[in-house]
Image (cartoon, rainbow, N blue to C red):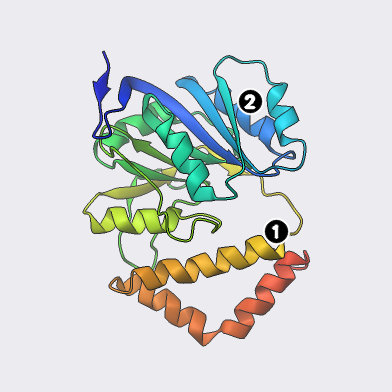
Amino acid sequence: MRYEDQDNASIVPGQLEFVVTAHNSEDTIEACIHALLAVKRASRVTVINDSSRDRTREILGAIDDERLRVLNVEFRSRAKTSNLGFRNTAAEFVCSVDSDVLFVNDRFEELLPLLDTYPLLMLTEDSTDTGPRRTGWDPAFAEPRNAFLFSRRHLPGLHFSELYPKAGGEDTDMAIRLLKAGVPLASVYGGYVHERVEGPMGWGRRLHFHMWNVITYLRHLDVPMCRRRLLEIARHPVQRAVRSVKQEFGNFRA
C-alpha cells in the first residue's frame, strides 16, 4: 500500500533507497555502489552524476544491476543534485551518501526503527557511536557530513537550502533549519568508512567550501553555536588559511 506525502509524491512503505551525489568520483564510485547494492534492504540506488569529467559515467554504465539508476546532470551544485535525487525517490526511507563512502557493515535493520524517534539520523564513522546521540546546540553539534538517513513519512518535502547553490553542500544549513523547527536529530554509527581520495580539492571548490561555512553561520546568527564558530574564524583567519593551503598541496591531513 502506498501513501502520499505533503508534495503529493507516492511513497512505498518499508523500502530503503540510496541517493549518491557524484562528481569526478572514478576512484571510489564503483566500490561505493556495490556496497550499497549489497545492503539487504536496498530497493534502489540513484546516482546523480554532476558534471564529472573523468571515468565516473563509464564506470557506472558498466554496473549491471536493475536497482541502479544514473542521472547525468550539469548542475555543478550539491544542493541541486541532492534535491533531484530526493524528488525521484519512491521509498519511505532515504539515505544520502557521498560517493567516497564505503559501507562495510549493514546496520540498517537497527537504524530504520530509530527514525520513528529521530526523523533524521547523521550517520558517523565512529563505531563507538552506538547511540543514538541527540544533536543539539552545544559545542559538540554534529553535522550530517558523509551520509544521513531520513524518513520521508516524518520529513515530507525535505530539501537542501537553495541559497548560494554552487557551494559545496548545504547539509549543515539543513540540519540547523530542522533543529529550529523542533525536529529531533541524532548521530549514530552508520557502518561505513570514508574512503577519502588523496589529492587537491581544487581552489575553486575549496573557496566555495569555506565561503559556504561562513554564509551558513551568518544565516543563523540567532543560534549561539553559529556565533561561536564565526568568532573562531575571525580570531584565527591566517592560521585557517595556512591550514587550507597545506591541505590543498597535500602537506597536511585533517
Residues under labels 2 and 1: Cα distance? 25 Å
In the foreground, 249 or 79: 79
- For residue 62, what is the image quadrant? top right
Q: Residues within 10 Å of mark 1 (few under 14, many from 20)?
A: some
Name the amino acid, label 2: His
Residue 34 numbered tag: 2
**On screen, residue 242 above or below 83:** below
Q: Position of residue 172 (x, y in %)?
A: 42, 57
Q: Position of residue 130 (x, y in %)?
A: 40, 43
Residue 194 visible in the shown view: yes
Horizontal side, residue 130 vs residue 119: left or right: right
Residue 201 numbered tag: 1
**On screen, residue 57 above or below 3:** below
Circle 2 — which element?
helix
Which numbered disc flags the more N-terminal residue, 2 or 1? Answer: 2
Q: Residues within 10 Å of mark 2 (few under 14, many from 20)?
A: some
Horizontal side, residue 238 vs residue 141: left or right: right
Circle 1 — which element?
loop
Residue appearing at x 66%, y 71% in the figure: 244
**Which residue appears farthest toward the left when viewing the image?**
182
Horizontal side, residue 155 vs residue 44: left or right: left
Residue appearing at x 33%, y 74% in the figure: 221
Q: Position of residue 85 (x, y in %)?
A: 47, 35
